[in-house]
Amino acid sequence: MGVFVMIHLKNVTKFLSGRAILSDLSIEVEKGETLVLLGRSGTGKSVTLRHIVGLMKPDSGQVEVLGKQLTDKESLAQIRSQVGYLFQDGALLNWLTIHENVALPLIETHQLSADEVHGRVLKALGEVELDHHGDKLPSEISGGMRKRAGLARALVCQPKIVLHDEPTSGLDPISSSIINELVNRLKSTGITQVLVTHDMNSAFEVADRIALLHEGRIHVVENVDGFRASKDPAVRQFLEGQVVGPLSRGFLDGGPSEEDRNEIS
């Protein structure tokens, strides 16, 4: 009996502002796997995550999550209830407490009593070691704690899949290590994860496989040891931070603007 494929993007193409951000992209993520997506800013890593959760629709190709195509509102609602999404900036509402922020997905998608919501929120906050900070506002806690609060919100509906968009971005090394430890704890529970990052230390610490995006496609996908040892010129350029190489094409010659890179990272 084969391993169940939780996420399957088949020949996905997406145009933004007349430019192909994803171009015939295909990738599978198996049950319980942690896949890390790497690539230069503006190569479509975050766009890929948004397709997985149905926040974007492909111009061509198919997206299957948990064996279902994201084709209508009913399938989207079913999938989104089983997919947690950690946004790059945490995306917490500043006027709500941490407890209230984490409770939002439950209130919006589940028919639970107030006591049940409270219990689930406390459990999620405990999983990210914020159980004593639920009454605080986002402005009253550190950047690393806000990321963890965002992760608690992604976990509160007990999803089968968690998507992480730059979970360690802007964090100090200790806070980054805490996030990596939390990702690995989730891995040990069998949750399927896709993680976008520029942090190579984080990628090597949490990944089962690493995929490099280039020119809108999956250029290389390898396990951690295979990626480290790869002789592929694009992989070597990315790992060694070389200015000149295959990943520089389009960026040194009129590639996406800084604004576009922030939008499509």
Image: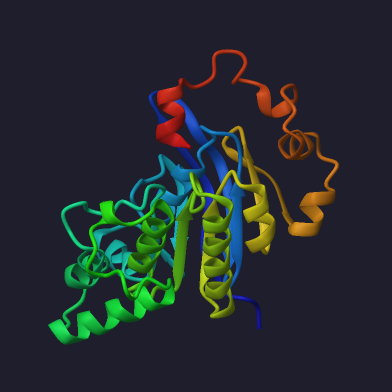
Coordinates of residue 13 in the picture (x, y in percent): 49, 39
Which sits in the foreground, 114 or 42? 114
Residue at 83 percent across and 46 percent down: it is 230
Which sits in the foreground, 178 or 191? 178
Coordinates of residue 126 in the picture (x, y in percent): 38, 78
Residue at 40 percent across and 25 percent down: it is 259
When asked about the image quadrant of residue 206, the answer is: bottom right
Coordinates of residue 125 in the picture (x, y in percent): 35, 74
Residue at 74 percent across and 21 percent down: it is 244
Residue at 58 percent across and 60 percent down: it is 177
Can residue 207 be seen by looking at this rendering? no
| Residue 109 located left or right of residue 145 | left
Which sits in the foreground, 47 or 138? 138
Using the image, determine if residue 222 lies above or below residue 159: above
| Residue 86 located left or right of residue 198 | left
Quadrant of the frame with the N terminus = bottom right
Can residue 216 be seen by looking at this rendering? yes
Which sits in the foreground, 127 or 138? 138
Using the image, determine if residue 95 lies above or below residue 136: above
Colour scheme of the picture: rainbow
Coordinates of residue 6 in the picture (x, y in percent): 51, 68
The mark total stands at: 0
| Residue 262 located left or right of residue 201 | left
**Residue farthest along the top direction in this orientation:** 253
When asked about the image quadrant of residue 29, the answer is: bottom right
